[in-house]
């Protein structure tokens, strides 16, 4: 089974057109304060609590919100290093390879790509030896032809959506 945060593997680029000004205001407010309560959002946006609650429920059902796991820092958990592993796969085995990679606990994200690389896998690890083991585990999966590993030196632009929301105003 292929893993995706959205119900359909292919997501329409027109999804944001379904969000009106109130939805976009809620999303913008949440980028400023992701832990804001419904009451705080209602006060900030001058909306009723019921309106905010209904809109939040609809946004959640539409897939607007990503996993809350994203905001947990792996460093205090003992995983100070992050790397990206480019994986070249036999195309007919892609789904099986993705399922196997998903079973590796240190894999925190993976994307299917176009071009010469099939998968870009983001991993966390304790040290270089741990990274070597993770890479070896991926290489041992039937259908994986080869990997290329790059150690992340630092996050220069953190995950963000605020500029996109501001652009739509």
Image (tube, rainbow, N blue to C red):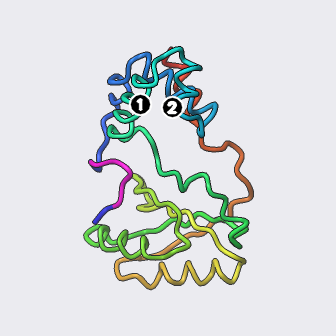
Circle nearer the N terminus (2, 1): 2
Q: Give the residue at x 54% y 56%.
A: 69
**Does dot 1 land on a helix, a strand or a loop?**
helix
Q: In which quarter of the image is residue 16?
A: top left
Tell me residue 94's x, y (percent). 32, 68
Q: Is residue 118 rendered to the left or right of residue 39?
A: left
Cα–Cα span, label 2 and label 1:
6 Å
Q: Nearer the viewer, residue 40 or 32?
A: 40
Tell me residue 64's x, y (percent). 41, 38
Q: Is residue 6 rendered to the left or right of residue 23?
A: left
Q: Are marks 2 and 1 in contact (CB under 8 Å)?
A: yes
**Does dot 2 land on a helix, a strand or a loop?**
helix
Q: Which of 1 and 32 is in front in this view?
A: 32
Q: What stretch is highlighted in magenta?
A: 3-7
Figure quadrant of the N terminus: bottom left
Query: What predominant SS class does the magenta segment belong to?
Result: loop
Point out which mark residue 53 bears. 1
Tell me residue 44's x, y (percent). 59, 20
Residue 47 part of the magenta-drawn span: no
Q: In which quarter of the image is residue 96?
A: bottom left
Tell me residue 22's x, y (percent). 44, 18
Point out which mark residue 38 bears. 2
Q: Give the residue at x 55% y 35%.
A: 37
């Amino acid at each position: 089974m292929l893993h995706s945060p959205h119900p359909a593997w292919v997501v329409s680029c027109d999804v944001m057109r379904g969000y009106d000004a109130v939805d976009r205001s809620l999303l913008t407010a949440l980028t400023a304060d992701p832990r804001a309560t419904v009451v705080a959002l209602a006060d900030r946006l001058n909306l009723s609590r019921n309106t905010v609650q209904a809109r939040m429920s609809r946004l959640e059902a539409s897939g607007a919100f990503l996993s809350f796991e994203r905001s947990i820092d792996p460093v205090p958990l003992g995983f100070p290093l992050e790397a990206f592993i480019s994986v070249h796969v036999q195309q007919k085995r892609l789904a099986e390879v993705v399922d196997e990679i998903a079973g590796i606990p240190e894999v925190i994200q993976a994307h299917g790509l176009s071009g010469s690389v099939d998968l870009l896998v983001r991993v966390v690890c304790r040290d270089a030896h741990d990274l070597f083991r993770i890479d070896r585990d991926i290489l041992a999966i039937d259908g994986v032809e080869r990997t290329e590993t790059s150690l992340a030196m630092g996050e220069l632009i953190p995950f963000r959506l605020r500029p996109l929301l501001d652009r739509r105003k």
